Amino acid sequence: MAGLAMTDTRPTRSKLRALEPALLRPRLKLPPDHAALYDEADGPGALLDRLVERRLLVEAARLLAYALPPREAVWWSCMCVDHAAPADLPVPERQALDAAEAWVRRPDAENRRQAAWAAAAAGYQAPGAWAALAAYWSRPERPDDLRGGRGVETAVDRTIARHTPAERAPLLASFIASGRDIARGGAGRLAPTAGQRAAGQKAAGQNGSAPE
């Protein structure tokens, strides 16, 4: 499947956090015939590989939501939402994404409050609002607090739900590739979709500017 490398052979240390099976079970919700993976996989990277190999892409995305450190997880949710957002993304949701990214860059109390207000303004339903909620709930100084992961998981789930069933597996593949890149220390950026590029070109033409 395009965008999914089974195993990364580069010697870069992964940022993925090991979580106890008792914490993973109610969050990943693996099908019963795959439940042995909770105990068999040697670390979060190996578990992610096994989930991808078995095409459990939804579950692999859930693992990233909780195993990435808080700031990296919120950033990942922003990359996913932004990549798959419609060209006419409502302004309040865009502002919620911006607030979540601002918190990632400077995770202080003021940016946490701004993220909470932006999530409320976006209506608590849109994927971008959940990215902002994830920022508000996250506590980098409390790695055992997984509420931020719940926000990240929901942001990604609702992003996928905006698309047809046929579109979802390729999107999840790109999201997982992004999460893996972030776990290796990369930015996890995803290219704009065709619809976003077309909208950007149209807007640039209307403004009298050539697209980059």
Image (cartoon, grey):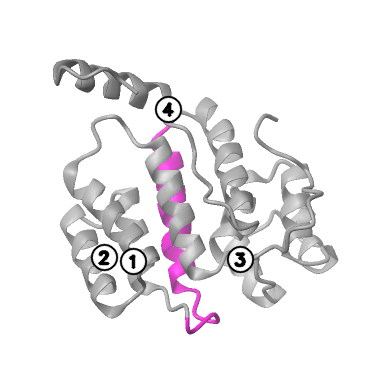
Find numbered disc 4 in the image and state the secondary structure of the residue it sits on.
loop
Quarter occupied by the N terminus = top right
Find numbered disc 3 in the image and state the secondary structure of the residue it sits on.
helix
Rounded to the nearest angstrom, the CA distance separating label 2 from label 1 is 7 Å
> Is residue 18 shown above or below 164?
below
Count of labels shown? 4
Q: Which residues are magenta?
A: 141-163
Q: Check disc 2 and report the residue beneath it.
A: 115
Asked if the residue at tag 2 contacts the one at tag 4, i.e. Cβ–Cβ closer than 8 Å, the answer is: no
Q: Residue at x 77, y 54 (%)?
A: 34
Point out the tag, 4 or 2, that comes first from the N-terminus. 2
Query: Is 180 left or right of 107, judged from the image as shown?
Result: right
Q: Nearer the viewer, mark 1 or mark 4?
A: 1
Query: Is 67 left or right of 161, judged from the image as shown?
Result: right
Q: Residues within 10 Å of mark 3 (few under 14, many from 20)?
A: many
Amino acid found under the numbered disc labelled 1: Trp
